[in-house]
Image (spheres, helix red, strand yellow):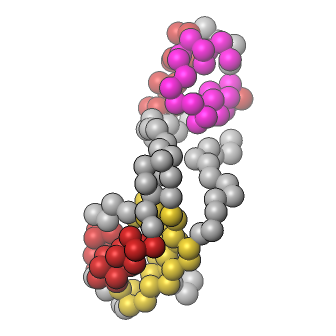
Amino acid sequence: MQMDERDRMILRLLQRDGRISNAELAEKVNLSASACLRRVRLLEEAGLIDRYTMLLNPARIGKPGNAFVNISIARQTREALETFEKEIQSVPEVVECYLLAGQSDYLVHVVYSNTADYERIHSEVLTQLPGVERVQTIITLREVKRTTELPL
């Protein structure tokens, strides 16, 4: 799909506030409500809009801690990686997981409530996942920037 500047404006506004009404969105991008809705539907159909969601405040729900964990798998066979990836999906404290090129195989973002909670996640969950050979944790001190908005 070829996007023009108006499409990019629509996407920027929806990234900031997915609950913006179509009427308000249309006004901000200088379109009629029906034309704006047509564009949004086309952006959805083209897969540019993946889904609509909300963001929780981690501290207010009791998960103020963030850890970034490098995980190395003993064998990098397709089967071993697929098994690990399947199992990591079921860990609720893992909010992101990326396959890497480099010294470790995966970078995992874990949220937790306190040090005892992270220790439990580390020793009872992460180290017990199939194929895990090494786990290295980086604990964050404070959040400097967090956004879900992609540059357009």
Magenta stretch, residue numbers:
6-28
Closest to the observer: 131 or 110? Answer: 110
**Is 77 left or right of 138, judged from the image as shown?**
left
Observer able to see residue 123: yes
Instruction: Work out which quarter of the rendered image holds the C terminus and state it.
Output: top right
The structure residue drawn at horizontal position 45% and vertical position 57%, both measured from the top left corner, is: 63
The structure residue drawn at horizontal position 63% and vertical position 68%, both measured from the top left corner, is: 141
Closest to the observer: 65 or 95? Answer: 65
x, y percentage for residue 106?
47, 76
State yes or no: residue 12 in magenta: yes
x, y percentage for residue 90?
28, 63
Vertical placement of 90 versus 55: above or below?
below
**Is 70 left or right of 8, judged from the image as shown?**
left
**Is 125 left or right of 19, judged from the image as shown?**
left
Vertical placement of 121 versus 56: above or below?
below
Location of residue 111 by image quarter: bottom left
Instruction: Work out which quarter of the rendered image holds the N terminus and state it.
Output: top right
Q: Main secondary structure of the magenta part?
A: helix
